[in-house]
Amino acid sequence: MFIAKAYAAAAENAEHIEALADAPTATEAFIWNMALVGLLVVLFYVLLIMPQQRRFKEHSTMLSDLKKGDRVVTGGGLVGKIDKIVDDREMVVDLGNGLKVTALRSSIQGKAEDVLKPAANDAKTKGEKKK
């Protein structure tokens, strides 16, 4: 009777040891975890940081290409025409009816045709959906 229990315990331990042998070691688990963290960092960079840098570069190029007579939209939503470029930081924007304001170049959201065109397209598609 005593021998049978010992044999049964040895058999259970053998199964447990075989299961542990199939488990990854601590080093393998660490390598897999670090690989997944590295993959997440690369994915984060590609999906979030690169597009933001590209938009910033396009916006900077657009700001440097502004000239007198361009229609622009400010960050506050004012639409006007560039009347005079004071220096590389400031410009005078004519809002119409002789109203002129001095705006920082960095406050310009974009050229009017680029900013207002998507809004006009959205209004057209909403009008078509209601019909």
Image (cartoon, rainbow, N blue to C red):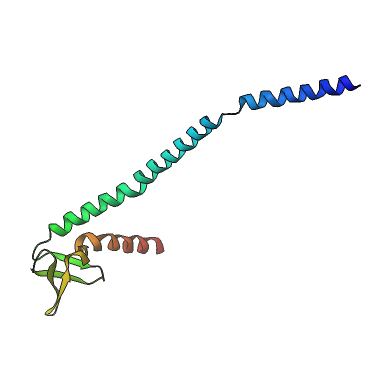
* 47 horizontally vs 24: left or right: left
What residue is rendered at 13% in x and 80% in y? 97
What residue is rendered at 28% in x and 63% in y? 120
Which x, y percent locates residue 80?
A: 17, 71
Classify the position of the N terminus by image quarter.
top right
* 60 horizontally vs 7: left or right: left
Residue extending furthest toward the right: 1
Which x, y percent locates residue 123?
A: 32, 64
- The answer to which image quadrant residue 96 occupies is bottom left
Q: Is residue 129 or residue 37 the one in the foreground?
A: 37
Q: Is residue 58 or residue 80 the one in the foreground?
A: 58
Classify the position of the C terminus by image quarter.
bottom left
Please, is residue 15 above or below residue 59 in the view? above
- The answer to which image quadrant residue 39 occupies is top left
User: How many marks can you see?
Assistant: 0
What residue is rendered at 82% in x and 23% in y? 8
Which x, y percent locates residue 11?
A: 77, 22
Which x, y percent locates residue 6?
A: 83, 22
What residue is rendered at 21% in x and 53% in y? 58
